[in-house]
Amino acid sequence: MQIADYLSKKKIPIPSDYNKKKRGTKSLTYGLWQQSTVRFILSNEIYTGTVIQGKRKKVSFKSKKFIDLPEEDWIKVENMHEAIISKEDFEKVKKVIKSTKGSRVVQNDYLFKGLLRCHDCGGYIGIRSPDKNGNIYGRCQRYGRFGNFQVCSPHNFNYQVFEEQMLEVLRQVCKEYKNKKKLEEIAKQTKFKQSQEIDLKKQIDSFKQDIEKETRKLEVMYEDRLAGIISLEEYIKNANRIKEIVKGYEQSIKEFEQKLSGESNNEKEKIRLDDLVEEFLKLKKPSKEIIREFIEKIEIHSDKQVDIYFNFKPLQQVNDNLKKFICAKKKYEKKAV
């Protein structure tokens, strides 16, 4: 709604006006952006420059009926036209829509709303309205609806305390990620990957030189064939062999280039994570958006145990190590007592 209002204030043409399409009598609100239009654009991959085909197919050539195909069977071709939405923004929107699906709009918009799941039944953990004392509680939504049928358990917890504790855990994880040892390890890994990248590029250049050699051989053979030095059968036999060799080199180049591309994407992901960590640690009160950048979901057990699932593997590893350290510390303290 905020985006729609912003576009309306800026007098950005709505899609039907932009395409000069007449759609019946114009209402008083014609020309104003609707939130449904913004949602449609932000959740439609075609606006990222991708063309999608094969979403449906006919039941049979005799029938006019179509059936929808699963997304994994669609044909997608990227960068086919100019994008107006970046891939990063499109993925963010997918996460927001998924996390808010089925939730009601309420006055209080809590930081971890939409990210909380029940570990036992897999359903959402709802955040209830403040009681008469101002306390806010989380509870398994499936229990709230089907508790009389012994479906799951309440999983009740004080949300205000939970939010403070989660923010503290996030800060600890981010600080640990940033500490000197972690940075040294990342630097070592980066140097190692840089040497790997140089080796891959050298190998690609070597394959390209081999292709040039084989291509020259083919040209010489063709000239020998024209001069009558070798027979047509010999030429065809050797030409096919050389073509197979070149095909193998080209396949190797393709595989090595894919590896290089993957390494490049990993570096971008690390830079993005570093920027997010820096931004989060500077904020006194983080926004829902940055929380969603970090966290995929949080599972609540019936015994109040909390499992955090991060969107970044390095943060997940730091969090798992911290949990192991805390558990080991508690066991040691019990033994000492």
Image (cartoon, rainbow, N blue to C red):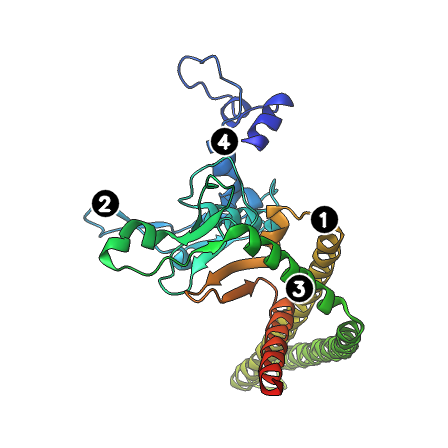
Q: How crowded is mark 4: few (under 14 residues within 10 Å), some or many (20 or more)?
A: some
Residue 136 location (% of width, % of height): 49, 46
Q: Mark 1 points at which residue?
A: 284
Q: Which of marks 4 and 1 is nearer the N terminus?
A: 4
**The residue tagged with tag 3: helix, strand or loop?**
helix
Give how far apart the Cα atoms at labels 4 and 3 are. 33 Å
Residue 261 location (% of width, % of height): 66, 67
The vertical placement of 104 against 56, above or below, is above
The disc labelled 1 sits on which kind of residue?
A: Lys
Give how far apart the Cα atoms at labels 4 and 1 are. 30 Å
Q: Residues within 10 Å of mark 1 (few under 14, many from 20)?
A: few
**The residue tagged with tag 4: helix, strand or loop?**
helix
Question: Residue 265: which numbered mark, if any?
Answer: 3
Q: Which of marks 3 and 1 is in front?
A: 1
Q: Earlier in the sequence, mark 2 or mark 3?
A: 2
- Nearer-the-camera pick, 279 or 194: 279
The vertical placement of 332 against 306, above or below, is below
Q: Give the residue displayed 48% in from the left and 46% down from the top.
A: 97
Locate residue 29 relative to residue 221 in the image: left or right: left
Q: Mark 2 points at which residue?
A: 65
Q: Give the residue displayed 57% in from the left and 76% down from the top.
A: 247
The disc labelled 2 sits on which kind of residue?
A: Lys
Q: How crowded is mark 2: few (under 14 residues within 10 Å), some or many (20 or more)?
A: few
Residue 239 location (% of width, % of height): 57, 81
The disc labelled 4 sits on which kind of residue?
A: Gln
Q: Name the residue under label 4.
A: 35
Q: Residues within 10 Å of mark 3 (few under 14, many from 20)?
A: few
